[in-house]
Amino acid sequence: MDFELRQATPEDAEAVVLMQTLAHEECYADLLSPDFFRHRRASIPERVQRRRAFLATEEPRILAYDANNDLVGYADAGPGREDDAPEALELYSIYTLRRTYGTGLGAALVSAAVGSGPSYLWVLENNPRALAFYLKQGFRPDGKRNTLPPEWEALPEFRLVRRASAGAPR
């Protein structure tokens, strides 16, 4: 399966929000309540407005399109958001639609967003598919845990870090 990757622009906000909403429904159906998903659908207009501002940057906001020109993946990254960030670069999010699983798209998005160097991310607990994917990308748990905000039903998450290779510059 071939994909085209490109930097997002503010004009892509609606497509990004709709694709992420579908990706959430596909990958988190067993982790979140039906009310969560109803609220996410109802809040699409508001989320599109917020996303426009977030996409107005030079930082990686990577879109992936399939051969039919359908948006099937998204990743974004930037400076670490915590005071105790283990690396300077954070992979904020990565989502692909289920039909792209196993195609290499996720690895291509990680590479486009954070390269192969040091970075970190947060992953939901009880998400074995995502954990296996991130482990393949060289990320490892560092012991830091967190709880998502109430609008995400206070799901537990933990941090994964990919350190610089031995002898490589940081």
Image (tube, rainbow, N blue to C red):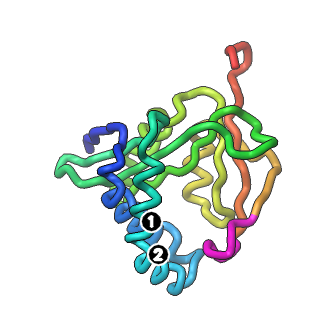
Residue matched to label 2: 40
Q: Residue at x 67, y 40 (%)?
A: 80
Q: Please name the residue shown 32% across and 38% down the image.
A: 5
Residue 136 is drawn in which quadrant?
top right
Which corner quadrant holds the N terminus?
top left
Inspect this view and state whether residue 50 appears: yes
x and y percentages locating residue 36 in the rendered image: 53, 80
Q: For numbered disc 1, what is the local secondary structure?
A: helix
Where in the figure is residue 91, as x and y percent of width and height? 58, 43
| Residue located at (27% from left, 47% from top) | 65
Q: Is residue 19 above or below residue 108?
A: below
Q: Is residue 149 magenta?
A: yes
Q: Is residue 56 above or below residue 167?
A: below
Magenta residues, as a range? 147-154
The mark nearer the N terminus, 2 or 1, is 2
Query: Where, by quadrant of the figure, is residue 20 drawn?
Result: bottom left
Whole-percent x and y of residue 169? 68, 14
- Where residue 152 appears, x then y in whole percent? 62, 72
For label 2, the SS is helix
Q: Tell me the kind of residue under disc 2.
A: Arg
Residue reaching furthest bottom?
Answer: 35
Kind of residue at disc 1? Arg
* Image position of 123 (left or right of 41): right
Q: Residue furthest left?
A: 68
Pointer 1 residue: 47
